[in-house]
């Protein structure tokens, strides 16, 4: 399996959630990039968020966001360490 542009867009949305505050949601406005709007809808269809335009993470969505943000941290930290 490879990372498609659609999966990357979904990961980008998951990376925007503040995992330190479960009461803080996310709103993808109609003026957002079409890829972001479509990604939010797919995340909703996958039951990772509770609204088609963002909202709050579901339990499964929180797990996915944690994993996505951890991976992003690992990959960006590894890049930073290699450059040093």
Image: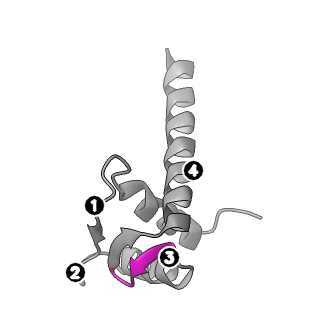
Of badges 3 and 2, nearer the viewer stands 3
Residue 23 is labelled as 1
Query: Dot 4 lies on which element?
Result: helix
Q: Quadrant of residue 7?
A: bottom right
Q: Position of residue 57 (x, y in %)?
A: 42, 67
Q: Give the range drawn in magenta.
A: 48-53
Q: In which quarter of the image is the N terminus?
A: bottom right
Q: Residues within 10 Å of mark 2 (few under 14, many from 20)?
A: few
What is the CA distance from the residue labelled 4 to the residue labelled 2?
A: 28 Å
Q: Where is residue 82 in the image (x, y as percent from the top left)?
A: 57, 20
Quick check: marks 3 and 2 in contact, CB under 8 Å? no
Quick check: marks 1 and 3 in contact, CB under 8 Å? no
Quick check: marks 1 and 4 in contact, CB under 8 Å? no
Of badges 1 and 4, nearer the viewer stands 1
Q: Residues within 10 Å of mark 4 (few under 14, many from 20)?
A: some
What is the CA distance from the residue labelled 3 to the residue labelled 4?
A: 15 Å
Query: Dot 1 lies on which element?
Result: loop
């Amino acid at each position: 399996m490879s990372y498609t542009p659609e999966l990357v867009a979904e990961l980008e949305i998951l990376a925007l959630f503040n995992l330190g505050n479960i009461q803080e949601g996310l709103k993808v406005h109609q003026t957002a990039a079409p890829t972001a709007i479509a990604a939010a809808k797919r995340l909703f269809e996958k039951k990772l968020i509770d609204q088609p335009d963002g909202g709050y993470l579901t339990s499964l969505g929180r797990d996915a966001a944690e994993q996505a943000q951890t991976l992003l941290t690992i990959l960006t930290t590894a890049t930073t360490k290699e450059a040093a």
